[in-house]
Every structure is written in structure tokens, then in C-alpha cells.
Image (spheres, helix red, strand yellow):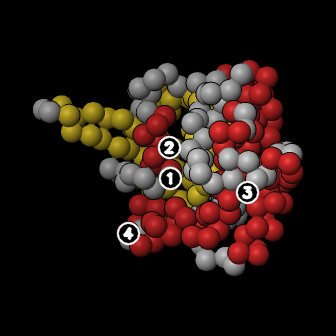
Amino acid sequence: MLRVTNISKQFQSGDNVVKAVQDVRLSVPEGVFASIIGQSGSGKSTLLSLLGALDQPTAGSIVVDGSDIAKMSDNQLIRYRRDKIGYVFQAYNLIPNLSALENVMLPMELAGLSRGKRRLRAVELLEQVGLDATKHTRQPSRLSGGEQQRVAIARALANRPKLILADEPTGNLDSATGKIIVALLHDLAASEHTTIIAVTHDQQIAKQAALTFKLADGKLVQV
């Protein structure tokens, strides 16, 4: 489902060329939960930005659901980010003045779904990720960290993306809640037929992932 072939990304820093990602090759099938691990500065965040089409590679190709991101026009990239990609962040990034339900409905509004369909799917997703129905109308400030991350995961699933990118999804959670969130992501990858990739320092995520890729100095050193 995801195929990365000889991806490289270079930056100019003064007189120096920084090779953030170097000739990375990896493949992740549909419905698989995978992790990318490595120390700070290993290239994890740059690779995540490339996979999410937030940045363009210097060389190589990234094929998601049969389409090469590197060859897309600006308009195609906008649609790709909206329709094919879901994002889960360490800081949750929920809109504070919207309820949990409204946060999940928002991506579907941008995709043009009717209000009735948006609401129905949002309720179904919040139930699927295990958020109690009594909390659907609460704003993020009235939810725990684990509950906010469940809402963020539901929001990421809203438009039925082919790929979900999770950036340190357990970084702000205690270890027990982190294990629950990782297990949830693992189960959702299979049940939603969605490829989920978590970029993390957390070895617990790596242990539960079906595939783990290790980066060091921008290079893939272990699968």
C-alpha cells in the first residue's frame, strides 16, 4: 500500500548540505501498523513530512494507494492530504472551542459531506475508539490526555484515509494509557484496512508494531 523507493532529502544550511534522509527504501502493506524509530536527528520527522506530502523529496518516489506523491500537482497534493492521509499528533491538536464530536466532524465538512452523515460517522468513530458517549459533547479541556488522543485518532479516521501518520502518539501520555492507545492503533489498522505509521522514541510502540524501521543519520539501518 505504501512503497518508498530511494527517498532522499537534502537541505542547504549555510555552506553545508544537510542530508536529512538518505536513500531510504521501505514498504508497508495495507492494514498494517508499523513504527519508525530512531534518536533525535535521525531523520524520523523529515521522513514523516515527506510521507504526508508536507515536504517534497530531493530524489526518489513515495507511492500511496498507487499514486506517486512526488509527481502530484499542488491541487492534487491538497486533495491527497485531505482524502488519503490522517494525522495524529503528540499534542493532540484538537480545536479547543469545538466538542469532541465537532472535532471529528470537521474533516468531513471540508470534504463536503452532509451534516447528517458527518454526525453519524463521528458518533460511530468515537464509539469505536472507546470514548464514552457522555463525553462526546465535551470540549478538549474537559477530557483527559488519553481521551483527547482517542478523539484525535477518530478525527484521523474520519475521511477513511489510506494512510495514518502518528507523530509520537504516546508522548504526552502515562505508560499505561500509552499502551492502550498503541493497542487501539494496532487494532484499527486491521479493522479499518488502513496503514498506520507511528514515528516514535517509545520502544513499547516498536514492540507492538507489525513492522519496525530504524533510522540513524538519515539512513535505514534496521527492519
Q: Which residue is mark 2?
A: 48
Name the residue located 76 percent from the left edge and 74 percent from the top edge: 117
Q: Which mark is residue 52?
A: 1
Q: Nearer the viewer, residue 180 or 116?
A: 116
Query: Distance from label 3 to label 1 (Cα)?
Result: 25 Å
Vertically, is 119 above or below 103? Answer: below
Residue 16's spot in the image, x, y percent? 18, 31
Query: Distance from label 2 to label 4 (Cα)?
Result: 19 Å
Q: Amino acid at mark 2?
A: Leu
Query: Distance from label 4 to label 1 (Cα)?
Result: 14 Å
Image quadrant occupied by the N terminus: bottom right
Image quadrant where residue 20 sits: top left
Mark 3 neighbour density, 10 Å: few (under 14) some (14–19) many (20 or more): many
Vertically, is 176 above or below 27? Answer: above
Query: Distance from label 3 to label 2 (Cα)?
Result: 27 Å
Tag 3–tag 4 contact (CB < 8 Å): no
Mark closer to the observer (3, 2): 3
Q: Which residue is mark 4?
A: 74
The mark nearer the N terminus, 2 or 4, is 2
Q: Which residue is mark 3?
A: 101
Residue 133's spot in the image, x, y percent? 87, 51
Q: Is residue 49 visible?
A: yes
Tag 1–tag 2 contact (CB < 8 Å): yes
Q: Amino acid at mark 1?
A: Gly
